[in-house]
Image (cartoon, rainbow, N blue to C red):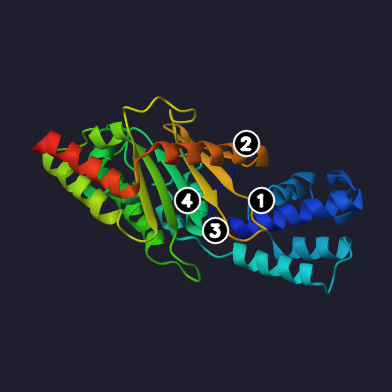
Amino acid sequence: MAPTQGPIVPRRRIADTLKSLRDESGRTLEEVAETLLISTSKLSRLENAQGSPQARDVRDLIRFYGIEDTQLADRLMRWVKASGRKAWWTDYSQATATPGLDAHLAYESEATVARLYTIPLLPVLLQTPDYARAQYSTHEPWWSAEEVDRLVELRERRKHVLAERDGMAPLKLVAVTHESAVRQFVGSREIMRAQLDHLVERSTAPNIELRVFPLAHPPLFSMSCMYAYFEFEDELDRDIVNIETHAGFRHIETAETVGYYRGYHDKLVAASPEPGESRALIRKIQAELFG
């Protein structure tokens, strides 16, 4: 799949709208592509939010479906323009080589709420640079020292969504992390002590809700892997789930399955102590580990 080099939400809006227009017209991909003298694969990419939509192609489709001079046509062209903006993560092309990470960053940048579950590491957006560096350093010889520097820098840039975004409120983070992630030793004692301090302090921000799923609680479905549920405010935009593995990200967009994951995450939240109690648990673990 082509790299995600710009905003992904406008592309999904274009894709959904063009697919709906074609369905309403009763035409097949092949019929529309043949009439417009474009390849079927190009039209398919447009309808699946892949690649960068070109204004000329969308304009031709607007004419084909007979919606010129309508509000829908205006919205389509605005979305084309919005989708063409350069994304900040394109400056980190080597650091975003993990399959699906670029799309994950696009959703993270544009979502209203991110509902996370992490194990066995702490949420990326709440990690200190030293913790992140220590984690990446265990991947040798996969990453050189220079690559680790860029990866850590990328993670620091990602944190900006929690503080400020152009034209949008800061991202609301609802994170559940397994108690084993709090206890998982990464780097030195000093790094871990500072990381747990940071976790407690940062989680008091008004747009951050952090809970620790306790070891004492019976296992719940979906808690064996890390994932993010991205929620969008505009009714035009569908929520999406990204499952994270060592091999990359798997994107889930089917409405029924996405809905299941919202329920899974709600159960994790309900089974975990309230944020204040979770911070107290982190302090207790910190005292056990470091005195």
Question: Between disc 4 and disc 1, whose residue precedes?
Answer: 1
Label 4–label 1 contact, CB within 8 A: no
Circle 1 SS class: loop
Determine the CA span between mark 3 and mark 1. Answer: 11 Å
Residue 175 or 137: which is nearer the viewer?
175
Residue named by callout 1: 49
Circle 3 SS class: loop
| Amino acid marked by disc 3 | Gly
Name which residue lies at 66% across and 38% down.
256
| Amino acid marked by disc 4 | Ala
Assign the C terminus to one quadrant of the image. Answer: top left
Residue 110 or 89: which is nearer the viewer?
110
User: Can you see residue 128?
Assistant: no
Residue 81 or 209: which is nearer the viewer?
209
Label 2–label 4 contact, CB within 8 A: no
Name which residue lies at 49% across and 54% down.
113
Determine the CA span between mark 4 and mark 1. Answer: 21 Å
Residue 75 or 215: which is nearer the viewer?
215
Label 3–label 2 contact, CB within 8 A: no
Determine the CA span between mark 2 and mark 4. Answer: 17 Å
